[in-house]
Image (tube, rainbow, N blue to C red):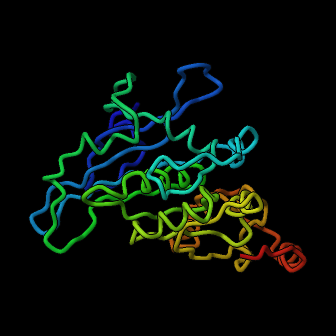
Amino acid sequence: SPLQEQYPVFPPGYTLVYNIHMKDPAKGKGGLRYCGFLAKSNFSPETPTTYVLALRGTDNYLDWAEKLDILPSPGPFGNNSGNVVSGFLDIYNHMTFSDPGQLKPKGLLKYIRYSIRYTDMQSDDDVQPMVCTGHSLGAAMATLFAAGDAYSLHPCRSYTFGSPCVGDPAFVSFYNALITTSERYYNLPDLVPTILDAFGYDHVHSGIPLDSLGDPALSWLPDCTHSLNTYMYLLGAGKPVMESNCLISDIDDDIMIKKLSFRRRY
């Protein structure tokens, strides 16, 4: 549970409010691992306060999939919230938040809104001052948080990257009706966004496709097509964000491989 100054980089203009944790199977019962933060924008007379919930993916892009319970569970967000992936719901229900520097959890992530002052979040122009964002498994958790938070005074604006399906079509309809600002970025050759669609699950809106196969300098290997660095590069961050093992030196050979690659249909 790092302090703000212990982060290698922390977004300028924001203050760390809480660190977020999820269960770590490797540490046994009660073991937790860091998976993100809640930050609050610094005061400005011109703009309302904004909170950002940011949740990371896992180190191994599919390590959560090996033991995931893919059976459906009733959505806990209301009678019409459909079904969600049981494994994701279990992870979400056990996620906690803590004060920076404190190892003892302060509460469950799904109740974090009760610790936020609503008076900080008033806006004359109906701007939604809560942003939920995440990558991979973190994207699935951000989607569940947004769904559970949808009936609050200010529902999340949601931005996710490489998210797997989280629920069935009924859940998607529930989510889409309540979350008005939702952008789900997916890389066309990324396997994770389609890994659960064969089991009757679907994606929330609005899907925005990216295509790393269109850049011959980028690797086509699965861990690279799913990497958050690749998503950031495709959205304009530039090659400095890319890991060296995801950049191709022999471009001609890689172009041939890409032309022969199966492009998934979305």
**Which quadrant of the view contains residue 124?**
bottom left
Q: Is residue 45 above or below residue 63?
A: below
* Most foreground residue, 131 or 87: 87
- The image shows residue 25 at horizontal and vertical percentages of 64, 27
Residue at the spot 35% in from the left edge and 46% down from the top edge: 38
- The image shows residue 190 at horizontal and vertical percentages of 71, 64
Residue at the spot 75% in from the left edge and 57% down from the top edge: 199
**Which quadrant of the view contains residue 49?**
bottom left
Residue at the spot 60% in from the left edge and 56% down from the top edge: 166
- The image shows residue 159 at horizontal and vertical percentages of 46, 64
Q: How many marks?
A: 0
Q: Is residue 213 left or right of residue 50?
A: right
**Which quadrant of the view contains residue 163?**
bottom right
- Residue 251 appearing in the image: yes
- The image shows residue 169 at horizontal and vertical percentages of 61, 65
Q: Is residue 171 above or below residue 91?
A: below
Q: Is residue 232 left or right of residue 226?
A: left
Which quadrant holds the C terminus?
bottom right
- Residue 242 appearing in the image: no
Residue at the spot 89% in from the left edge and 78% down from the top edge: 256
Q: Is residue 156 above or below residue 263?
A: above
